[in-house]
Structure formats: C-alpha cells, structure tokens
Amino acid sequence: MYPRQFEYVAPSGLDEALALLDDNPGAKVLAGGMSLLPLMKMRLLSPELVVDIGRIGGLGDITDNGDTISIGALVRHAEVASSSLIQAQGAALAAAASWTGDRQVRNRGTCCGSMAHADVAADQPVAALALGATMVAASSSGVREIAAADFFVDVMTSALAPNEILTEVRIPKAGAGAGSAYDKLGRRGGHSDYAVAGAAASVTRSNGSVSAASVAVTGVGVRPVLAGAVAEALVGSDGSDAAVEAAAAHAVAGVEVLEDLYGSVEYKIHLAKVFTARAVKAALAAAG
Amino acid sequence: MQVSMSVNGRQVSGDVEPRTLLVHFLREDLRLTGTHVGCETSYCGACTVEIDGKAVLSCTMLAVQAEGADVTTVEGLAQDGQLHPVQEGFWERHGLQCGFCTPGMIMSAVTLLQENDNPSEEEIRRGIEGNLCRCTGYHNIVRAVEYAGAKMRGEEPPPAEWEES
C-alpha cells in the first residue's frame, strides 16, 4: 500500500520548514508519522509536499520551566509516558501517553502530533484539556499560544492554521494538593487501542474539600471536550465517592454523543460516566 | 532520492521515491525478505524492525526517514551461525505456528528484553501488544520470551510445560 507520489523535504531548521508551509498551502507536516502515513497510505490524504520536521534540532526535549513543563514537537509518546517529571506533575498525560497505540507506535509517534491530529478518540488531547495545557504554534509571522480548551475544534480539526507547526505542548505543574489521572476503555479491551470512551481529571484539595477541578471526556463526540458541569459539581464538595459519582452523572452534559463502530450512544454515555468517576477518584487519591 | 543507512551492521544506500516505505526498501531493494508486510495499516506488527534500539513499524515509516539510522532486521540477529536467544526460545518453546508474525514478534521481543531483562508475564504480554498472531499462539510466544530472557541473564530457562518437572 503506497501513498500517492509526493515531494519530500527534511529541513534542518524551523524557519525553513515554516517558509515551506507558507509557499505550499497543501503541504503536510511529518513528525512521527503514526497518523499521517496511514492516512496517506489509505489515500484519504494526498499532500503534494511532505515537510519532515524530524531533522530539526531542539524540538525533542522535555523541559522543566519551573511552573510549567514543555514537551517539544519531536518528543515521542514513550518519552512522555516514562518521564518521571511528567508522571509526577502531569500524571494524566503520562498515563494517556502510556496507553496510546502500542509499543511500536509509542516509539515513533509524538505527543504534539497526537494533539495536532485531534482524533475524536485519542488519549492525550483529553489529558491536555483537563490539565489546562497551552499549545504553542509557530508560523513565519511568529509564535501563538492557544489554550487547549480552544484547540480542539471538530473531527480531526485543530485550531492550527495550515502554515503553523505545533512546536510545544506546555502543561502547568500540579501545585500543592493537586493530582490528575486518566482512564479509559480501549477498543481492544483494557487500555489497548483508541478509547471507546475515557476521561481525564485534574483536581486540587484544600482544607478537606475540592477547591479546583477540571474534567474532560474523549471518544464520545466530535472532539475531546471539557465536562464543565462535572467540575462545577465537584468544587466545594468533600470529594467523597458519593460526591464524585453524583458529579460524574454530568459527564456528557451539553455534549452531542455519537455512536460509532465501538459503541451505541447509550453505552458511550454509560462509559463516560464510569470513567469520569474513576479518573476523578484516582486524581483525588493522587492529590492526597 | 538517495538514502543511506546501516542495516544489520552493513552500510547500504539506494535511490528511492519519497513514498517508498522502509519495509519495501528492505524487502525489494536489499532483498531482506525476513521482515513481513502484514496488515499495512500499522496494527499487526509483522513489519517490526529495530531502529536505533527501538522497535518500530517499517511499514509506517518512509525509507527516507531512516536516513543515517541504524536498522536491525530479523536477518541481523544470528551471529556466526548461532541463533539469537530469542530465536532459540521460539524454536525451543514452539513460539510459532504458521510463522507469519514471527519476525515481527522476535524483533519486538528482542527490543523488549533490551529495555527490561527480566519482564513479568504481564510485561511480556504488554510488550508484544503491537504484534498480532493470526494463529493466536500467544501462550507459547510468552514462554519463548521467558526462555530467551533467562538465557540472556545467564540462567537456566524454566522447563517446557510438556517436560516432566
């Protein structure tokens, strides 16, 4: 199964890559290739130019900025999953990366690529939403920061312009009394494969009650989405199992749930509530 | 486009179209047909090779992306006529039936044991989750990897289940 013919360029600098995107509106950016190449092989996508950013220096680092952690465009899923910094400060994202694809996919695919691809059932976008990540997009006219909440627009559609490259995902570090978690049912059972449905949660406890919460669900609609009503119900509660389950009942409030090959609307709604409760409980446990 | 890389310790180069997948460069240009083409959709793992120490899918990588890389295929495992311990494990513990998934399974297992020299059964099963066996012969594949791990640690492998203990 071959892709259609295309031109291939592997620039050594970001400026050169961005100039190529300006000059070739139909070009696609290649990093790990775990989403782009299958689409091209199945001929769902046939770009005339592929700009491989894999040779650009300085994009492969996980950086501790003090209050935040930067994940560069070439950081692989396996590196996010095994990073002790991300495990400690953004556990939901580390878990999501550890359950993305399979071992081979995690060795090549990139965290930023997963965000840019914006699959409706992907793991890492929903963790980025719950953690309140910032997406850093570069173009020839400069750098733009996009809140994760504004980044996932529609089915496989992000807020990136065609001439932009997502160079960094930046997550805030968990503060005192904070914890996060992600859980899902995979299409092949357990945590394997894309999510039939899943949820990520980030919570903060203080003085015996939940002082802040952010919850997001994946696999249920056209995009990963914040479950604002769940967070609202959690904040101010005691974080007991009963409070969590009452809050999780709002998991798909305001979401148009769609069926797919892996589950009916009813089943997805059920799973979204179950995994929202599990993710919130795990996040609360991590928060101490 | 010109591409050059190291394959099984040998420096190779070729003239390929940008769309040439690494697996086709290996099989058709280098005639290394040990690496198999299975599902072609990044699910089955039959095309798994080792690149710079990591298991990757050679059907989901352009040959030009491997420029300058260090590639090992199943053909590169045996040394001086001696099977690699993972190959020996598949032989000794009947880790293959039809054999189609075997090269990918072996490359996956080799890299798994490089990362974790004493994996639990669960870690082995998780480590080969990206490799599908259409004969469903996972049980003996796990035993084969356990055998290889023991050999590589310099230990006596556990007895085969069909041997008297």
Image: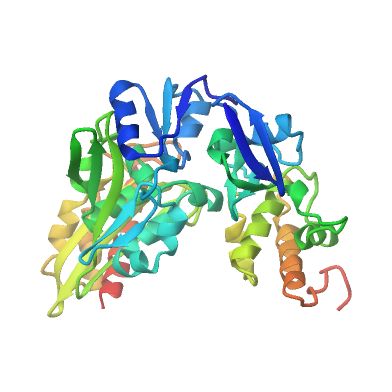
Among the 4 quarters of the image, the one containing residue A260: top left
Place of residue B138 in the rendered image (x, y in percent of width and height, measured from the top left): 70, 55
Q: Is residue B163 left or right of residue A62?
A: right
Give me the residue at 64% from left, 70% from top: B117
Query: Between residues A197 and A110, which one lies in front from this camera angle?
Result: A110
B36 vs A82: above or below: above
Q: Is residue A16 left or right of residue B55?
A: left
Give me the residue at 36% from left, 39% from top: A13
Place of residue A258 in the rendered image (x, y in percent of width and height, measured from the top left): 32, 37
Give me the residue at 15% from left, 53% from top: A229
Number of numbered discs visible in the structure rendering: 0
Tell me if residue A254 can be seen: no
Q: Is residue A141 left or right of residue A40?
A: left
A5 vs A104: above or below: above
Place of residue B44 in the rendered image (x, y in percent of width and height, measured from the top left): 62, 42
Query: Between residues A82 and A212, which one lies in front from this camera angle?
Result: A82
Among the 4 quarters of the image, the one containing residue A263: top left
Give the quarter of the figure containing the C terminus of chain B. Answer: bottom right
A1 vs A270: above or below: above
Give me the residue at 80% from left, 48% from top: B97
B22 vs A243: above or below: above
Give the quarter of the figure containing the N terminus of chain B. Answer: top right
